Amino acid sequence: MAIDRFGRNIHYLRISLTDHCNLRCIYCMPEDQTFRPNADLMQDDEILLLTRLFAGLGFDKFRLTGGEPTVRANIVEIVRGIASTPGVRSLSMTTNGILLARLAEPLRQAGLQRVNISIDTLDPEKFNRLTRWGKIDQVWEGILAAEAAGLTPVKLNAVVVKGYNEDDVIDLAALTIDRPWQMRYIEMMPFAGVTDVQTQQVVTAAQIQEKIESEFGPLEASGEYDGEARIFKIRGAQGQIGFISSVTVPFCSACTRARLTADGVLRMCLLREKEINLLTPLRNGASLEDLRQMILDAVWHKPWGHGLSQGVIPLNRAMNEIGG
Ligand code: SAM
Ligand code: SF4
C-alpha cells in the first residue's frame, strides 16, 4: 500500500499516453500548440513496466488519458497489457470520443471497462468553436458505440466556459432524463498555454447548478461522490448529474491520485508544479527497486492540496501534457 504522510491511501494512477491531440479545445491548449517528439514519450514497454511497478505498490485503479489517448499507436495492445497486469482492478479512459466509433469494441475486448467522453455542448457550431475544428456527430457516434460495446455506465464530461457554452448545460443535463448516463460538469482550471481563458471565463459549479435548476427544478442530492464528482439527479431521471468543483469546493482531503505524464514524469497533484521524473532514471538503468523507492518517496510527499485560492497557478505544463 502506498500511503502519504497525511494518511491518504494513494492507489489511483492516471496515465497520459500522449500529449498529442486531434482537437484543440480552447480551454486546454492554444491553437498552435506543439507536441513532444514520440521518442520523448514513454514507449509501450516502459508504460507496461511502470504499470507493473505501481500495481505492485497497491495501485489498483488506472485511467488512460492524454492529450487524446486514442491517437496513440497500438492503443488496443497497450490497453490489453495494462488490463492483464496483476493487481489492476479498474481500467478506464478519458477521451474526446472522436475515434471511438471504431475503437470502442476492440478496446472493450482488450479489457477497457469504462470511458468518460468529453462533450461540452450539443450544438454543432459551438462544438466546432470550442474544439477549434471538431465535428459533434463523430463524438455522438463514439458515445453510442461506447454504450453498445458495454463501456458503461457512460459518463460525459463538459468543461463550462463563459461566453461559449454556459447555456448549453441545460441540453446536456436533459440527456440524463431518458438515459442511464452520468453528465459531469467540470469547473475550468488554470495551467500554462491558455491561462487567460482559464482564469477569466470560469463558470462555477454553483452557477451551473443554478442554470440547470432554473429549467428542471431543484436537483436531488444523492449525498454521494463518484470519484471527485458530487452526484445529483433531475427528479425522475434515469441518469445522474455530477459537479466537479475543483476550484470552488476542492476535494483534496479525499484525493487518492497520482498522475504519470506522457513523458514519464510523476505528478502527485494536478495543480502543483512539483514533479518526479521516472522515465530518465529508467532509461539510465535504474533498478526496479530504485524506481519503487522513488515512487514511494513521491507518494509520501504528495502535497496536501492545491493553492488556487492563494493565486498559485501551475505553469510548468499545459493540461494536455498532464491529462486532467
Ligand atoms: N482528450 C481527452 C478528453 O478531452 O477527454 C482526454 C484528455 S483531457 C485533458 C481530460 C479532461 O480534462 C477532459 O474532460 C477535458 O474536458 C478536461 N479539461 C481540459 N482542460 C481543462 C481545464 N483547463 N480545466 C478543467 N478541465 C479541463
Ligand atoms: Fe484534446 Fe482533450 Fe485537450 Fe480537447 S481537452 S484539446 S480533446 S486533450
Image (spheres, helix red, strand yellow):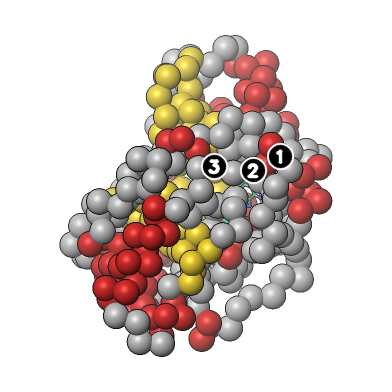
Task: Indicate whether 227 appears above or below 299.
Answer: above
SS assignment at label 3: loop
* Left or right, residue 261 beside residue 300: right
Characterize the local packing of mark 2: few (<14), some (14-19) or many (20 or more) Cα atoms within 10 angstroms: few
Residue beneath disc 2 = 307
* Identity, as a three-letter code, of the amino acid under mark 2: Gly
Q: What residue appears at the point 26 percent right and 73 percent down from the top-left corner?
A: 289
Picture quarter containing residue 77?
Answer: bottom left
Q: Kindly tell me whether mark 3's CB lies below 8 Å from ligand 1.
A: no
* Left or right, residue 87 beside residue 322: left
CA gap, disc 3 and disc 2? 7 Å
Q: Is residue 104 visible?
A: no
Q: Nearer the viewer, residue 70 or 45?
A: 45
Mark 2 and mark 1 in contact (Cβ < 8 Å)? yes
* Identity, as a three-letter code, of the amino acid under mark 1: Gln
Characterize the local packing of mark 1: few (<14), some (14-19) or many (20 or more) Cα atoms within 10 angstroms: few
Q: Nearer the viewer, residue 242 or 136?
A: 242
Residue beneath disc 1 = 310
Q: Earlier in the sequence, mark 1 or mark 3?
A: 3
* Identity, as a three-letter code, of the amino acid under mark 3: Gly
Could you tell me residue 64's position as x and y percent? Answer: 42, 60
Residue beneath disc 3 = 305
Q: What residue appears at the point 42 percent right and 80 percent down from the top-left corner?
A: 281
Q: What residue appears at the point 44 percent right and 15 percent down from the top-left corner?
A: 236
